[in-house]
C-alpha cells in the first residue's frame, strides 16, 4: 500500500482558552433532521485528555484541507485534541482500514471517518463500536444505519448536489443537446449519488445524457486520460459534468488540449485555484460547492456530543450551492472558493 500521509496532531489548548470568542460566527448544527439518537455517556477521559481522530478519504485534494481546517476549529473551541491522518490515495482501501484499526488499538476517544468505500469500511467501524469508540461518518455514506451502526452522517446531500449541477448545465445549454458525464471512482458513494442526481435533473431539463460509465480514477492524471478518451469518442457533445475537483481538473486539461475549452458548457463539483481561474476565463459555467470547513467542524462537534451522551441528529446536511461567474465575487462565496489555508491551518 501507499505510505500514509503525515499525521497532523492539534494539541488540546489549556482549559483557560476554551471560551470561544467567535461563538456567534461558528456554524451551528441544523436542528431539523431525520430523527435524533441519544448516545450513552461514556466514562472516558476528561475533556482535555480526549483525542478525536479524523480519518479523511485522502489528503491530496484541497477539499480535505478545508475539512481539516473545520476539525481544528472545533477542537480548539472544545479544548480537545484532534488528529488528522488519511491515506495518500483515495483508492487505498487497505490503508484506510489499517488506520482505523490502529486508532482502535490506540484507544482514540472517538473517530470521525470519511469512508472511501461504502462497504470496505463497515467491518472496521463495527470493531470500533464494539470497542466502545463512537464513530461519526462524514462526507460519504457507509452501508448500515445511522444512530445504530454509527453515530450520525455529516455530509452534503449529494443527490441534491448532483441535481443542482444537472439543472445548471441544462440551463447553460438552453435545454437541449448532448451532455457528457465523466464519473469519479467505483465504490465512492458520495460521487455516485452526485452522478445519479445529475443524470435525473439533466434529463428532466431536456438534455440527452451520454454516460459510457467511464471512471476518472483518483488522480488528476488518470482523470485527464479518461477525459481525453471520452472526448475522442464523443466529440459532438455540447456539455460536460464532473463530480469532484480532480475529475473536473482532468476534464479541463483534456478540453484545453482539444481546443474545446470555453466552447463546451462545463459544470463541475468542488473547487481548486485551477478550476476557479478557469471559471474566470469562461471555461467553466458553474461549480457546485460543498461546505467542507463546516463538514469537518460539525463532524468533530458530533463526536464530542456523542462522548457527552447528548442527543444527535442521525443526518446532518452541510449544504451545497451553485457558484457561477455572476456570483463568484460575493464574500461568502469567495471563502468557499478560495479558503485561506495559511490562516485556517495555522501553517
Image: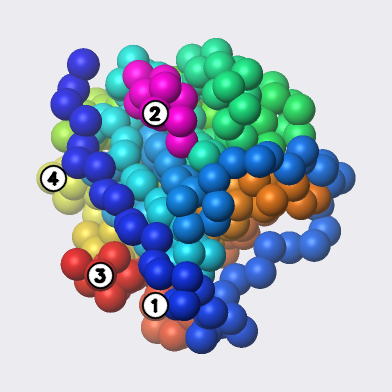
Q: Earlier in the sequence, mark 3 or mark 4?
A: 4
In the rendered image, is residue 32 in sight? yes
Relative to the observer, which residue lies in front, 11 or 265?
Answer: 11
Residue on which the image places disc 1: 334
Q: Earlier in the sequence, mark 4 or mark 1?
A: 4
- Residue at (40% x, 75% y) in the render: 335
- Secondary structure of the magenta portion, mostly? helix
- Residue at (76% x, 28% y) in the render: 148
Labelled disc at residue 257: 4
Residue on which the image places disc 2: 106
Real-space Cα separation, disc 3 to disc 1, in angstroms = 19 Å
- Callout 3–callout 4 Cβ contact below 8 Å: no
Task: Mark 4: give few (<14), some (14-19) or many (20+) Cα within 10 Å.
Answer: few
Residue on which the image places disc 3: 346
**In the current view of this chain or complex, which residue is farthest to the left?**
257
In the rendered image, is residue 216 in sight? no
Is 313 covered by the magenta stretch?
no
- x and y percent of residue 274 in the render? 22, 60
Q: Secondary structure at mark 2?
A: loop
Relative to the observer, which residue lies in front, 151 or 58?
Answer: 151
Q: Nearer the viewer, mark 3 or mark 2?
A: 2
Relative to the observer, which residue lies in front, 198 or 235?
Answer: 198
Relative to the observer, which residue lies in front, 285 or 345?
Answer: 345
- x and y percent of residue 263 in the render? 30, 57
- Callout 3–callout 1 Cβ contact below 8 Å: no
Q: Nearer the viewer, mark 1 or mark 2?
A: 2
In which quadrant is the N terminus drawn? top left
Amino acid at each position: 500500500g501507499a505510505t500514509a500521509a503525515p499525521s497532523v496532531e492539534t494539541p488540546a489548548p489549556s482549559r483557560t482558552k476554551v471560551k470561544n470568542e467567535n461563538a456567534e460566527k461558528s456554524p451551528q448544527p441544523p436542528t431539523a433532521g431525520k430523527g435524533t439518537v441519544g448516545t450513552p455517556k461514556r466514562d472516558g477521559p476528561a475533556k482535555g485528555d480526549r483525542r478525536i481522530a479524523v480519518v479523511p478519504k485522502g489528503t491530496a485534494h484541497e477539499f480535505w484541507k478545508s475539512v481539516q481546517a473545520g476539525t481544528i476549529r472545533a477542537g480548539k473551541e472544545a479544548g480537545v485534541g484532534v488528529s488528522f491522518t488519511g491515506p495518500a490515495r483515495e483508492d487505498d482501501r487497505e490503508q484506510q482500514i489499517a488506520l482505523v484499526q490502529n486508532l482502535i488499538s490506540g484507544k482514540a476517544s472517538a473517530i470521525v471517518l470519511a469512508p472511501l468505500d461504502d462497504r470496505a469500511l463497515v467491518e472496521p467501524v463495527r470493531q470500533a463500536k464494539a470497542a466502545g469508540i463512537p464513530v461519526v461518518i462524514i462526507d460519504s455514506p457507509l452501508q448500515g444505519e445511522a444512530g445504530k451502526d454509527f453515530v450520525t452522517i455529516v455530509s452534503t446531500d449529494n443527490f441534491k448536489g448532483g441535481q443542482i449541477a444537472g439543472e445548471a448545465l441544462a440551463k447553460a445549454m438552453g435545454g437541449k443537446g448532448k451532455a457528457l458525464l465523466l464519473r469519479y471512482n467505483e465504490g465512492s458513494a458520495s460521487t455516485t449519488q452526485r452522478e445519479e442526481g445529475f443524470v435525473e435533473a439533466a434529463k428532466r431539463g431536456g438534455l440527452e445524457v451520454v454516460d459510457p460509465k467511464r471512471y476518472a480514477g483518483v488522480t488528476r492524471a488518470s482523470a485527464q486520460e479518461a477525459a481525453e478518451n471520452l472526448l475522442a469518442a464523443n466529440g459532438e457533445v455540447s456539455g460536460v459534468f464532473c463530480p469532484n475537483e480532480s475529475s473536473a481538473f482532468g476534464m479541463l486539461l483534456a478540453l484545453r488540449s482539444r481546443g474545446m475549452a470555453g466552447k463546451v458548457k462545463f459544470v463541475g463539483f468542488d473547487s481548486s485555484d485551477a478550476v476557479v481561474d478557469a471559471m474566470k476565463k469562461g471555461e467553466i459555467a458553474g461549480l457546485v460547492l460543498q461546505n467542507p470547513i463546516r463538514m469537518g467542524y460539525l463532524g468533530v462537534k458530533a463526536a464530542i456530543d456523542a462522548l457527552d451522551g447528548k442527543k444527535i441528529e442521525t443526518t446532518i446536511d452541510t449544504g451545497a450551492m451553485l457558484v457561477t461567474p455572476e456570483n463568484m465575487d460575493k464574500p461568502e462565496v469567495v471563502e468557499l472558493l478560495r479558503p485561506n489555508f495559511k490562516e485556517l491551518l495555522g501553517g
